[in-house]
Amino acid sequence: AQKVTQAQTEISVVEKEDVTLDCVYETRDTTYYLFWYKQPPSGELVFLIRRNSFDEQNEISGRYSWNFQKSTSSFNFTITASQVVDSAVYFCAPIINNAGNMLTFGGGTRLMVKP
Amino acid sequence: SQTIHQWPATLVQPVGSPLSLECTVEGTSNPNLYWYRQAAGRGLQLLFYSVGIGQISSEVPQNLSASRPQDRQFILSSKKLLLSDSGFYLCAWRGPDFSYNEQFFGPGTRLTVL
């Protein structure tokens, strides 16, 4: 069985601060995918990034960056110079190589960025 | 480009009433389709998924059922709603091939059972 832990249930920062959201998962698979989603107050889940287990190169996209460490089963997400619009719930979701490709969502981290 | 629609956006229903939520996808063929539920302040729970017309897999035994009458249509139903059915229902799709694996979500339906 898979398990995804987002230990930080709620984080509050002041605008322009950097913030890192942690994600640790358990899987017996050697091949898998990892995802991050953002859920703003409107409710719709927005896809942010996909990472496969073969590629441990960190990725940066604008103010977003992701640090994937297969050895520690972690896939952390950093927002640099946070903005009020970043306020949302962020979900980490690994997927195993199975029919249906089911995501297993972590409990989510609620990020509040204050002006 | 692909789009996913859900309706209604919000719904208030009495306990014991029936339910029908609809999800449709445009711009793709033979998608995998998913229904999730998110209770207030909690994470997402996968309810059903479908890899093709008439093919439904249930993840959680409950008061709900799903059907896929057409390739790009996914319906979530209940004959008699319970208070515990309240929540935010999200439909998602994924492409049929393995060129990418991410799921894309619809805008959701917020259901309140009174």
Image (spheres, coloured by chain):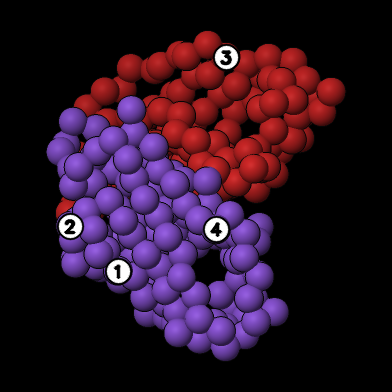
Chain colours: A red, B purple
Q: Residues within 10 Å of mark 1 (few under 14, many from 20)?
A: some
Q: Which residue is mark 3?
A: A63
**Camera sees residue A62:** yes
State the SS at label 3.
loop
Q: Nearer the viewer, mark 1 or mark 4?
A: 4
State the CA–CA distance, disc 2 to disc 3: 39 Å
Chain letter for mark 1, please: B
Q: Which residue is mark 4?
A: B8
State the SS at label 2.
strand
In the rendered image, residue B60, in percent from the top left (x then y), is placed at 38, 73
The three-letter code of the residue at mark 4 reads Pro
Above or below: residue B76 compared with residue A21: below
Q: Which residue is mark 1?
A: B67
The three-letter code of the residue at mark 1 reads Ser
State the CA–CA distance, disc 4 to disc 3: 35 Å
In the rendered image, residue A70, in percent from the top left (x then y), is placed at 32, 32
Q: Which residue is mark 2?
A: B52
User: Do pointers 1 and 3 mark residues of a single chain?
Assistant: no
Chain letter for mark 3, please: A
User: Do pointers 4 and 3 mark residues of a single chain?
Assistant: no
Q: Residues within 10 Å of mark 3 (few under 14, many from 20)?
A: few
